[in-house]
Image: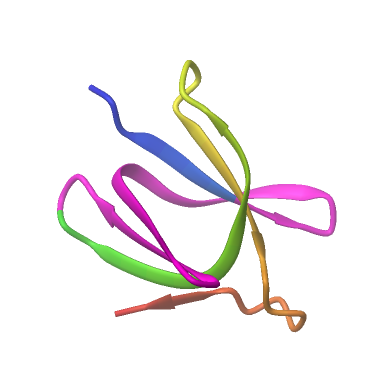
């Protein structure tokens, strides 16, 4: 399988946000993601790192308040 887990950086620590992400689209300052099972997630963030061999995507919030995810 080719899904990845998505982590957010908060205070220098990584926190698991989503598992089995199959789709990521950049729309301006927002990222639109969808899991293998269809769960859509939209958030203000930037991609810090993508490691396809480890199936990891690391994001950093664009929101200075730390409330980065907004599930639909």
Q: Is residue 40 above or below residue 12?
A: below
Q: Position of residue 19 (x, y in %)?
A: 37, 44
Q: Residue furthest bottom?
A: 65
User: Magenta residues: mostly which secondary structure?
Assistant: strand
What residue do we see at 16% from left, 57% from top? 38
What residue do we see at 49% from left, 46% from top? 6
Task: Say which quadrant the N terminus sits in.
Answer: top left
Q: Position of residue 26 (x, y in %)?
A: 43, 60
Left-right relation of 43 to 58: left
Left-right relation of 4 to 72: right
Task: Say which quadrant the C terminus sits in.
Answer: bottom left
Camera-side residue of 8 and 49: 49
Image: magenta residue range: 8-37
Q: Residue furthest front?
A: 28
Q: Is residue 7 above or below residue 62?
A: above
Q: Position of residue 16 (x, y in %)?
A: 54, 49
Left-right relation of 59 to 33: right
The answer to which image quadrant residue 31 occupies is bottom left
What residue do we see at 63% from left, 79% from top? 67
Camera-side residue of 57 and 14: 57
Q: Residue furthest top?
A: 53
The answer to which image quadrant residue 60 occupies is bottom right
């Amino acid at each position: 399988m080719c899904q990845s887990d998505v982590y957010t950086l908060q205070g220098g620590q990584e926190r698991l946000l989503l598992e089995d992400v199959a789709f990521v689209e950049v729309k301006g300052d927002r990222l639109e993601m969808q899991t293998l099972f269809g769960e859509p997630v939209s958030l203000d963030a930037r991609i810090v790192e993508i490691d396809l061999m480890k199936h990891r995507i690391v994001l950093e919030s664009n929101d200075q308040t730390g409330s980065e995810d907004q599930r639909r």
